[in-house]
Amino acid sequence: MKNKKLRAIAVTALVIFSMIGINSCLSLGGLFASDEGSETHQETYKMISVTPSGKIIGQALDPEKNPYCTEWDDDIGVRGIFFEGRIVELSPYKMGETEVPYWLWKEVYDWAVTHGYKFSKMLYGDTEDKRYSDEPSMGSDSSQQHDNSNSVFNAKHPVAFVSWLECIVWCNAYTEKTMGTTHCVYTWKKSGEICRSFSESDRVVFNPKKKGFRLPTEAEWEYAARFQYDNKNNNAVNYGTAAKPIWFTKLDSFSGADQNYKVKNAADTVAWCRVNSEKHTHEVGTKKANALGLYDMSGNVEEFCFDTHKMGKIKELVREIDKNKSAVKNPCYTHMQAGSEWSKVVRGGCFSDSNDDSILLGFRMWYHESKARNPRTGFRLAQTK
């Protein structure tokens, strides 16, 4: 009888110990191997709540205060998307605290390829290039062909060499892995199926009501990058009303910065860029965060948005996206989303950009071919609240 009790106690202890071990691994991130070998570390990827309030009233730019705005320049490429004549409302959402780090990409990727997901072969520009690996990389550098064994890089660098379509497929995989398929955001328009691989002839449909992981819209990205609680640093513009101000960092500055690009080293505390990056990416979250607690919204790697890129005159964009409405809610430009021939918006600039160029908050960049990769480009997650 005594032996039976001892065995029962031993079994109970073993079960409890096993549960503790299992539960310690259950987090938004998970475990990944360190550079030293068999040692493992537990990491989490944090989502930050963003709660826009009130209407965002687009502002005219002063050519004397904005380095890329002239009287003849009516193009939106350097003006952000909250421009004069546009009123935007955004629903509450979440943004990733950092760019997606390599450890998280690899963890989800390894799960995805054993659960029916397929990713593309390596493309650089418009064609397959065998100089590059078949998978997105652990960070990136200006040589554009680094290898993951380089001691400069580790799994906390942002994933780079990732295509827009890979981001779409990966987001669905991360959602299914952590929440199940019910919450997957992206489906194919013709088949209605969840995007688990690529299609050259179908369009990606984005369901903003789903709670899964996704790319931010460009409007969400810019709001999160520019928002300030006040104008104590004198580096913000009111995009709200006098009674209910919405303070945004100026377009010729950087996310989280107190000064504009003309002030030497203004970008240094908040962004990895040409002047301080030593020509490669760095671990995410090592610079100063912006007002919302988001890191690297300027610099490190450019970040994909869901929107298709549209260059042109401001009035044309308002007519095409906003349907000439006086105010638009949750705008997202998805015209001609079929296949891979249409350019995708990237924002924030990267480690190889100068501090008076693409890392400025007003810059709207793009990358051709949604299935192609670029050493400068990674992504950040968003979620609908």
Image (tube, rainbow, N blue to C red):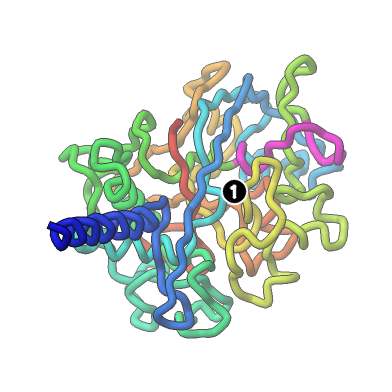
**Mark 1 residue crowding within 10 angstroms, few (<14) / some (14–19) / many (20+):** many
Of all residues, the one furthest to the front in this rendering is: 2
Residue extent of the magenta highlight: 222-237
Q: Viewer-proximal residue, 238 or 27?
A: 27
Quadrant of image for the C terminus: top left
Q: Residue at x 24, y 57 (%)?
A: 9
Residue highlighted by disc 1? 364
Per the image, is 229 magenta? Answer: yes
Q: Residue at x 73, y 43 (%)?
A: 251
362 vs 385, left or right, is right
Q: In the rendered view, would you say 203 is above or below 36? A: above
Residue 6 pos. (x, y %): 21, 60
Q: Residue at x 25, y 41 (%)?
A: 187
271 vs 172, left or right, is right
Q: Secondary structure at mark 1?
A: loop
Residue 371 pos. (x, y %): 34, 60
The amino acid at mark 1 is Arg
Q: Residue at x 32, y 74 (%)?
A: 134
Task: Please tell me in which quadrant of the rendered image residue 208 appears.
Answer: top left
Can residue 22 be seen in the rendering of this structure? yes
